[in-house]
Image (spheres, grey):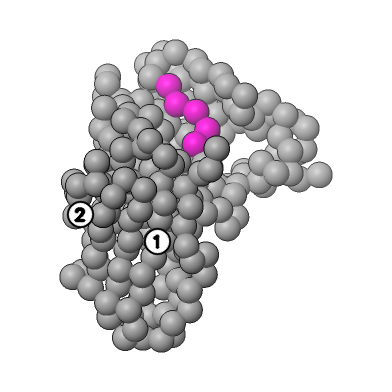
Amino acid sequence: DAKTTQPPSMDCAEGRAANLPCNHSTISGNEYVYWYRQIHSQGPQYIIHGLKNNETNEMASLIITEDRKSSTLILPHATLRDTAVYYCIVRVSSNTGKLIFGQGTTLQVKP
Amino acid sequence: DAGVIQSPRHEVTEMGQEVTLRCKPISGHDYLFWYRQTMMRGLELLIYFNNNVPIDDSGMPEDRFSAKMPNASFSTLKIQPSEPRDSAVYFCASSSGVQPQHFGDGTRLSIL
């Protein structure tokens, strides 16, 4: 599975959009981009995933560049409850094995 | 719907004691994963099962660690004998086929 690079921390004002970047320059054609987050003292929570098209669900939007070497997770209206560590993971969808978690981005949403 | 259920939520025990962590996956899920999280190493996969059969245990740190899945609704992770360096948060996750994994809230283990 390809390696990902994320900034260690970011701040965002409550009510504003939070844009979390992820670089995955060695991604292969059959690898998906997954995003999870971990709120303090809880288990990781699945947010969204995509292959090459932009994706949106009730939690967030995922924008993947045309060359697929980077992506951005967008939380459209961040709340204090979105404060968490956000992990970007790249893997082949048919690989039902391990998720390789990096250090992630600690997002602090401030009032 | 009930999520992945882990017990106990917290465990404090003395070095050398046997520790058993328990997990109930989401009903209908055919994959079960055990992860460990520490400050130094982050989140790492220990072992995973498919249809109750262990598939990859390459992440199990030592022979002191063992995991079983006697049926589709229950799994255990056992440490015997426990050591202080085993202190960590242990997570169980389950999934259905290629769908995303769902995690429990973990067991915080402290070995004194």
Q: Secondary structure at mark 1?
A: strand
Neighbor class of circle 2 (other Cα within 10 Å; few <14, some 14-19, many 20+) is some
Residue B87, horizontal then vertical, whole percent: 41, 73
**Which numbered dot is residue A42?**
none
Q: Looking at the image, which is closer to me, A107 or B37? A: B37
Q: Are marks 1 and 2 in contact (CB under 8 Å)?
A: no
Q: Is residue B29 above or below residue A32?
A: below
Q: Is residue A89 visible?
A: no
Question: Residue B34: percent from the left, percent from the top?
Answer: 34, 54
Q: Mark 2 — on which chain does it sit?
A: B
Residue at coordinates 38% horizontally, 80% vertically from top-left?
B84
- Residue A47 shown in magenta: yes
Give the answer, above or below, for where A66 lies relative to B106.
Answer: above
Mark-to-mark CA distance, 1 and 2: 17 Å
Task: From the image, state whether disc 1 or disc 2 is nearer to you.
Answer: 1
Residues in magenta, as a range: A46-50
Q: Nearer the viewer, residue B107 or B7?
A: B7
Location of residue A78 with respect to A105 vertically, above or below: above
Left or right of residue B72: residue B107: right
Mainly helix, strand or loop, the magenta region? strand
Number of numbered discs: 2
Q: Residue at x 74, y 44 (%)?
A: A80
Q: Would residue B91 be seen by someone viewing this image from the given angle?
A: yes
Secondary structure under the numbered disc 2 in the rendered image:
loop
Q: Quadrant of residue A61?
A: top right
Q: Position of residue B9 (x, y in %)?
A: 52, 64
Tell me the subunit letter for badge 1. B
Residue at 50%, 28% (x, y): give it.
A48
The circle drawn on residue B57 is: 2
Q: Amino acid at mark 1?
A: Arg
**Which amino acid, by three-letter code, is at mark 2?**
Asp
